[in-house]
Image (cartoon, helix red, strand yellow):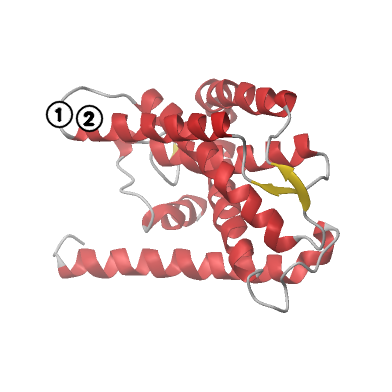
Amino acid sequence: MLEELLHWLGFGLCHQLPERSFFGGGVQVPVCARDTGIYLGFAVSLLVIAVVSRGRRPQETPRLWLVLVGLAFLGAMALDGVSSYAGLRETTNDIRLITGILAGYSLTLAFAPILNGQLWRRPGPERVLGRGSEAIVWLVTVPLLFVLVSWVLPVLGVVYPVLVAAGILFTFSAVNLAIVCLLPPFENRYDRLRQAWLPIVLSFCLTAAELWVTGSARAVLERMAGLA
């Protein structure tokens, strides 16, 4: 039951090739190694930004040097993906994982200001990771997350794919929360996260609908192609 649920969760998001995926307790992680890095990287990076900001809720984009770091992170994933698919070089699941983590981290540099600017009643005027110490902590957590996902989570058995599933749900729901908060009844209305329970619930429902639609669409396309 759990294995089928995890498979369906990532069915519309990823090719789910076993040779490009990780396993925990004999259960395949819902998405491939690269996507695992993207979703966990996005979720952890957003949480790190929230923690180091200490309630200031910055809504301005990071400094230029950090934007360039984020672009380099995205470029690393693009380079690995394009060069390996073109047959120019071989890649590995560990490389797919770390480049995915880098991409997930980079995306939050653009997303965190948007979420803070839409959700909170009084978003802060500061830049995301505007202080040097905050940026250093953020950067240090990149290799730490890689070590955690590569060496620690696999020994936790089925907890591993469940945590990745949670990362997927968190990522989609966070993005959907920013979208929901574009609506006037929810825009800039909250001082505490618990006050935003209604848009959070709506965002989770939207996530469930999106995953169902993408999974159903893939199933239909595979049947049409005679692959199912």
Estimate the x, y position of residue 54 in percent, counting from the top left.
83, 39
Q: Amino acid at mark 2?
A: Ser
Residue visible at 32% across and 69% down? 217
Of all residues, the one furthest to the bottom in this rendering is: 185
| Residue 197, picture quadrant | bottom right
Q: Position of residue 203 (x, y in %)?
A: 62, 67
Q: Position of residue 79 (x, y in %)?
A: 30, 30
Q: Which mark is residue 68?
A: none
Mark 1 closeness class: few <14, some 14–19, many ≥20 residues within 10 Å: few
The residue shown at (59%, 67%) is 179
Instruction: Say if residue 207 shows up in the picture.
Output: yes
- 208 or 53: nearer the viewer: 53
Residue sitting at x 53%, y 66%: 208
Q: Under tag 1, what secondary structure? A: loop
Residue 141, horizontal then vertical, whole percent: 63, 25
Badge 2 local density, few (<14 within 10 Å), some, or many (20+)? some
Q: Nearer the viewer, residue 78 or 129?
A: 129
Q: Is residue 24 visible?
A: no
Q: Is residue 45 above or below residue 182?
A: above
Q: Are marks 2 and 1 in contact (CB under 8 Å)?
A: yes
Residue in front for this viewpoint, 203 or 59: 59
Residue 51 left/right relative to 146: right
Residue at left 16%, top 25%?
88
Asked whether 123 or 90 is in front, the reply is 123
State the image quarter where residue 16 is shown.
top left
Q: Residue 92 lies in what quarter of the image?
A: top left
**Residue labelled with disc 2:** 84
Q: Is residue 214 left or right of residue 59?
A: left
Q: Which residue is mark 1?
A: 87
Considering the numbered disc 2 on the image, is that residue within a helix, a strand or a loop? helix
- The quarter of the picture where the C terminus appears is bottom left
